[in-house]
Amino acid sequence: MADTKTALVTGASRGIGRAIATALAREGMDVAVVATADSPAAQKTMDLIRSEGRKAYFAPLDVSNFAACGDCVAKLLEEAGNIDILVNNAGITRDKLLLQMREADFDDVIAVNLKGAFNMTKALLRHFLKKKSGNIINISSVVGLMGNAGQANYAASKAGLIGFTKSVAREYAAKGIVCNAICPGYIETDMTRQMPEDAREKLRAAVPMQRPGLPEDVAAAVVFLSHAPYITGEVLRVDGGMYI
């Protein structure tokens, strides 16, 4: 269909990224899957998109590499012909208490989580400006709002992403481009499942709903924002009440 939208999702090979890609496909969108490398996990995401009857595109990318992001977007635009929605979901953790945290632990997390969103947004901005529309959804975290011991680097990157979101929203609202952030709380993923049980129990206890969220809960918020052209600069928490 001529009016079919295309979404680009970074970090889409598993977890929250996969759930977002699949949910957008279910909404009738074609999806560009961006991940650090081609892998069985990335192929699984593409299979899920295709099972919804939508087109799936793939590009390997290190989002911290500015030039590579530009090349990746150019390639995907050539293949898909158009991109309407950018979901900056790629993220990493290097958790340590500040006294033990190495400079590289801090730099790597900022480079992927924060600079990666800048790189991808910058790479797509001219395309959005040319067509006078675009929807940017940044996956931040409640940790960016409340902080967390052992995550000074991660919290700084996610708080920075909120400031970045609001600035982009202000700059480009008049050009038909919206930019919002989603802040997941404790979400059940491969990463959180690897945490010690006592740590997971502490997190569960901090959630008024008394349970972790699912990747699909975050994906539902992305779907909502993908259909919300008059919302911009908003920070939407998906955290079961963890940060009220």
Image (cartoon, rainbow, N blue to C red):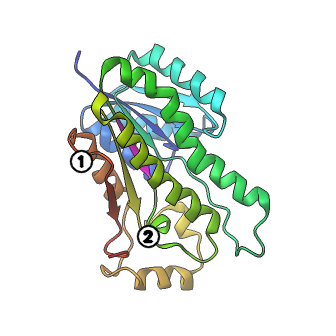
**Which circle marks residue 77 in the picture?**
none
Q: CA distance from mark 2 to mark 1?
A: 20 Å
* Residue 239 point in image, percent of width and height: 35, 69
Q: How many marks?
A: 2
The magenta stretch spans residue 158? no
Disc 1 element? helix
The amino acid beneath tag 1 is: Phe
Residue at 47% of width from left, 73% of height from top? 146
The amino acid beneath tag 2 is: Tyr
The local crowd at label 1, few if under 14, some if 14 to 19, many if 20 or more residues have their Cα within 10 Å, is: few
**Which circle marks residue 186 in the picture?**
2
* Residue 183 point in image, percent of width and height: 40, 60
Q: Quadrant of residue 23?
A: top left
Q: Is residue 136 above or below residue 68?
A: below
The local crowd at label 2, few if under 14, some if 14 to 19, many if 20 or more residues have their Cα within 10 Å, is: many
Q: Is residue 193 visible?
A: yes
